[in-house]
């Protein structure tokens, strides 16, 4: 050291940058920082249902066909006997069918008459009457294929 100088008299080299501030900025008073950390979801995902759907209800006279007959055929074939056919209920299904279906039962004739080409005159219900829906025709066909169960 030079004479009369002290350690504090040494020039300090200026690097042009200010010292680094390592203190945290003040907390924003509008932000809540003490929220609990949510715990991770540990629940198991739902197990897929692998059971088979139930069998569809069997098509029977009582469950399906009687309603079709009552709504689509009754006006002509229960109170009257159009074409020689009078349906009095399920007990009529084993009777012989009249006219061109004489070699079949009433139930078999019904199943044939609702098909597009019934083979004997026209299909039922006749032209001008509300037609059977595709579902009703399918139900009559399924009933016939199952052996006309009551």
Image (cartoon, helix red, strand yellow):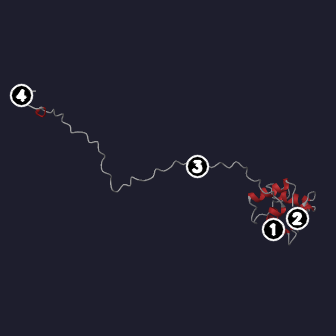
The residue sitting at the bottom extreme is 79
**In this view of the protein, which residue sits in the foreground, 124 or 6?**
6
Mark 4–mark 2 contact, CB under 8 Å?
no
Q: Nearer the viewer, mark 4 or mark 2?
A: 4
Q: Is residue 70 above or below residue 44?
A: below
Secondary structure at badge 2 equals: helix
Mark 2–mark 1 contact, CB under 8 Å?
no
Residue 90 disc label: 2
Q: Residue at x 40, y 53 (%)?
A: 34
Q: Is residue 8 above or below residue 32?
A: above
Secondary structure at badge 4 equals: loop
- Distance, label 1 to label 3, CA atoms, is 55 Å
How dense is the environment of label 3, judged by Cα within 10 Å: few (below 14), some, or many (20 and up)?
few
Mark 2–mark 3 contact, CB under 8 Å?
no
Q: Which residue is mark 1?
A: 70
**In this view of the protein, which residue sits in the foreground, 111 or 1?**
1
- Distance, label 2 to label 3, CA atoms, is 57 Å
Secondary structure at badge 1 equals: helix
Name the quarter where the N terminus is drawn: top left
- Distance, label 2 to label 1, CA atoms, is 12 Å
* 53 left or right, relative to 82: left
Mark 2 vs 1, N-terminal side:
1
């Amino acid at each position: 050291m030079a004479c009369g100088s002290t350690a504090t008299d040494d020039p300090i080299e200026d690097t042009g940058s200010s010292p680094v501030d390592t203190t945290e900025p003040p907390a924003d008073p509008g932000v809540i920082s003490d929220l609990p950390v949510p715990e991770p979801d540990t629940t198991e995902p739902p197990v897929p249902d692998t059971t088979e759907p139930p069998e569809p209800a069997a098509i029977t006279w009582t469950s399906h066909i009687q309603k079709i007959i009552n709504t689509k055929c009754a006006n002509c074939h229960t109170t009257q006997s159009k074409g020689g056919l009078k349906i009095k209920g399920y007990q009529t299904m084993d009777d012989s069918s009249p006219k061109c279906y004489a070699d079949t039962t009433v139930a078999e004739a019904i199943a044939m008459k609702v098909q597009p080409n019934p083979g004997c005159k026209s299909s039922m219900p006749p032209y001008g009457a509300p037609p059977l829906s595709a579902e009703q025709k399918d139900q009559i066909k399924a009933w016939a294929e199952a052996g006309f169960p009551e």
